[in-house]
Image (spheres, helix red, strand yellow):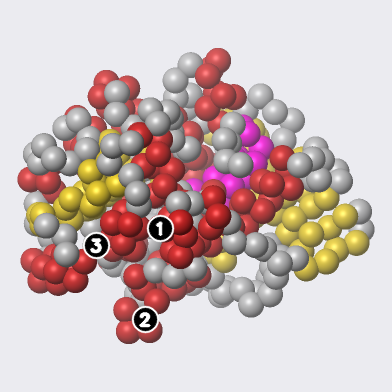
Amino acid sequence: MKKLKIGIAGLGFGAEFIPIYQLHPHAELMAVCQRSAEKLGRIADHFGIPKRYSRYEDMLLDPDIDAIHINTPIPDHAEQSIAALRAGKHVACTVPMATSIEDCHRIVEAQQQSGKQYMMMETAVYTREFFYVKELLDQGKLGRIQFLRGAHQQEMAGWPGYWEGLPPMHYATHAVSPLLALACREADSVNCLGSGRIGTRLAEKYGSPFAVESALFRLRDSELAMEVTRSLFETSREYVESFNVYGDRMSFEWQQLEREAPVLFAGETGERVRIPDYADRLPKEIRKFTMQGVYDASENRHLSFTQGSGHGGSHPHLAHEFVMSIIEERRPFPDVYTSANWTSAGLCAHESAMNRGVTVQLPHFGTTGQIEERARCPIR
């Protein structure tokens, strides 16, 4: 197989993927891009990366790069994804896809016109916990899913300024995606309520006053509903990215505290379960990255990695899926349409919250007949 030549934009959280791509048997990390010259030089020197760019536009002009992995601030995701697709590059982009429905449509259109792959790098559907529950579902042990619930609660004080006052549901994909992936459906409509208040200085940034947003979604072409709760500021809670799945045979509930284990229920009896690692699904060269990463040392720990507890070992699985979808000429999971639905779920939820819980219908991306096939989770 040929090797996919990759450039990484953004070296905060993005540095976590450098050694994964360097060791992947079908990838070659060609270049990195970072606005800070000092940081760019230090990280590129440390990892021995030949090409360095301080301007994103210059990296897109490099004919030796096949694909761009975007790890830049949220406000830049849409424009940078569109620019890369139009430049003929495959795109992997950290979450969320965009901050408006219009930009989700623009990215879908750019992907369709370019014929290149787009994958939103959603950690929550590549964690060992997700793999475990998906395995139970595929084996028939959960039975028929009856209800799903997700939550992502995080204190963002101390993060870069563009996070301050961000509407909670604008960054909802970590809570939304595992539920929709397990249900093999897209979100169809939402009613969401805002609760509590954040400080005036934070609220003025985006015009979003709520401390917490809690949404009830109806799934498309399904009898299922799901509940999602999201908070970012001034709400006391240990960090959690969680999902609960209730089946007619068994149910899975996330633990209350990080140091505990999740609970598996059979009937009215529950027991804590040990979640295995799934590194054996990966090429041997990158298996170690399910348990370790760039940010292991206490003096070099990125907040996203620390608060997310390494994102459940998802990083090498994400990189592997992106690389192999291109090598094998197939759609990645999530593809551009699924990414748009997962992102717009949160955007529409916030719109509902700002209008006292009115029902908001999610847009369709692509044709209705493709929806079930697109939403179906191929992970085994």
Inter-mark Cα distance, 1 to 2: 21 Å
Which SS class for mark 1? helix
Mark 1 Cα shell of 10 Å, populated few (<14), some (14-19), many (≥20): few
- The mark closer to the camera, 1 or 2, is 1
The quarter holding residue 220 reads top right
Looking at the image, which is closer to me, 104 or 207? 104
Looking at the image, which is closer to me, 69 or 165? 69
- Residue 197 visible at all: no
- Horizontal placement of 218 versus 29: left or right? right
> Where residue 36 sits in the image (x, y, percent)?
12, 65
Residue at point 71% right, 67% down? 274
Does the stretch in magenta take in 173?
yes
Residue found at the very far bottom of the displayed protein: 299
Amino acid type at circle 3 is Leu
Residue behind mark 1: 285
Image quadrant where one finds the N terminus? top left
- Horizontal placement of 213 versus 249: left or right? left
Mark 2 Cα shell of 10 Å, populated few (<14), some (14-19), many (≥20): few
Secondary structure mostly seen in the magenta stretch: helix
Residue behind mark 2: 297
> Where residue 51 sits in the image (x, y, percent)?
10, 54
Query: Which span is picked out in magenta?
Result: 172-186
> Where residue 144 sits in the image (x, y, percent)?
80, 38
Amino acid type at circle 1 is Glu
